Structures are given as C-alpha cells and as structure tokens.
Amino acid sequence: MSASYFAPHTLDEAIEVMAAHAPDIVAGGTDYFPSRDRSPLDRSLLDVTRMPELRTISVSDAGWRIGAATTWTDLVRADLPPAFDALRAAAREVGSVQIQNAGTVAGNLCNASPAADGVPPFLVLNAQVELAGPNGRRHLPLAEFLKAPRRTDLQRGEIMVAIHGPPVPQGATSAFEKLGARRYLVISIAMTAVLIVLDDDGLISEARVAVGACSPVAQRLPGLEAALVGQSPDSPGIDADALPELTPISDVRADARYRAEAVPHQIERALQRAARYG
C-alpha cells in the first residue's frame, strides 16, 4: 500500500480523510517520527496543523480552550493568567526549543507517556479533551481519556480538537516542578503541578495537586488537596506518609523509593513558588 500525505484546512475534511484512508495523525511529529526509528513509512499521514480551529487559545469568564495543534511555543508566548503558570513552565520543559516550536499539546497527550510534561498542569486545570469523529463530537475528562501507558480513549476515526476547562478560580496561581537526571532535554523522573488559592490570611483555601512520571498515568491527589486547606503554603509539612494515594513505580530512571522521597519535596517547592507569584 502506498502512503499518502493529507493536510486538510477544515475539520470536516480531516474526518473524511480519516474515514477513507485511516491515516496516522501527525502534527509536529516530534514523537511519531523518532518512534519509527528507520522503518519505512507504510501508512498515510494526516497533518492537522493547517486547521485554524486547532490553533486557537482563549480564556474567558466562561472557561478556557486550547486548540489541539497549539505548539508549546505558542503556550509560552500566550498572555495567560497566573493559574496557567504551571502549564507554561511545563511547556518550557518539553524537549528543546526546536521541539517546542513543532510539538503540540495534543501530541503530548495522545502519546500517553507516563512522563508527558503537559499532563499534570492540565489535570490541575480540570481539563477535558474535545474529540471529533464520524459520530460527532464528545468531551471527556483528561483523567478518563488517558487509560494506560501509550493507550487513550481515542476511537477509530476520531481527532482531538481541543483541550477545554472551566473558569479558573479567582486569584488562583500555579507552579510546576520537574526532576530529571540533568537540567535540560530529559525525561522526567517525577514532576508535580499545583494550583492554589489563598485566603486573606495567606492560608490555602483551595488546592489541586497532580503528580506525573510516578504511576502508569499521571494522577491528582485529592486526599492531600483536602489536607492542605487551611495550611500555609510555606510550611505544609508533607512527607511520604501524607501521600497514601501515590504508589510510585520503579523503572530505568529511578526506583519507587526514590520517587516516594522526592515527590513531597517537589510538592512543597511548587506550593511555595505558586504562593510567591500569587
């Protein structure tokens, strides 16, 4: 079978191509092409980067929307409120500048790596994914879309259109922390995103915490989030025993014990940073 290349300008055209040719979807291709190593291209490709609907960023009182083909550089440069600081910080950690210029938010999510830098910041923003296919559009919480390493709920013929979320809390700030074997161009050993709101006394009135690269799928920690309410972000006193929901994995980058010891420090630093810039 010969491989073809399609670059539609509308979503309807893209869905028609999906139905007729069952191509692989690519945007920046920063995950797709390296994963092929040197194997020949034997499947048609659908390039989704030319559809304007997939490249917009908007934040309003009604909520926020980030198009699926938005690049990480687009996010870094966007004028976003402090609640999105964790997402922008993660955007700066996605590979090199060249990868940030080409790689897209949907590619990061659909690749479904446990160490995908974009997932924890999106989780604390209560993100949903918008999917479009032959049966219309549907919305799904990001936590439900990500099923397992390299596995999502994307159905045959579907394309991710955007990532949505509800209005961010008034006064919310956020921060992102990443631990790797070196400073740049590294896959995460552990990463944490937090979003907090402080009351008039400087104590936490709302907290959201998500941890990635420590489990098959990045996860929120609702027990810790509830325990943080009423505490000072400068001295929350978090240790491994305070994170019963977190059951770190062992892999080639680190063992479970190392992750269990590192994550509480990450969370504390992220809380302090979020409070400092609030």
Image: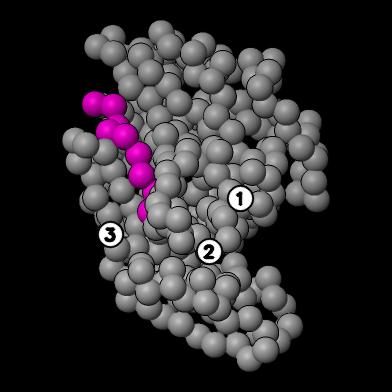
Task: Name the outermost residue toward the bottom.
Answer: 2
Q: Is residue 169 magenta?
A: yes
Left or right: residue 75 compared with residue 252: left
Of circles 3 and 1, the one toward us is 1
Relative height, residue 48 to residue 262 (above, below): below
The amino acid type found where label 3 is placed reads Thr
Q: Which residues are magenta?
A: 162-170
Dot 3 or dot 1, earlier in sequence: 3
For label 3, the crowd category at 10 Å Cα-Cα, with few meaning under 14, some 14 to 19 and many 20 or more, is some
User: Residues at badges 3 and 1 in contact (C-beta under 8 Å)?
Assistant: no
User: Residues at badges 3 and 2 in contact (C-beta under 8 Å)?
Assistant: no
- For disc 2, the marked residue is 157
Q: Check residue 152 in the rendering and tell me which mark sits there, or answer none.
A: 1
Quadrant of the snapshot with the N terminus: bottom right
The amino acid type found where label 1 is placed reads Thr
Relative height, residue 31 to residue 168 (above, below): below
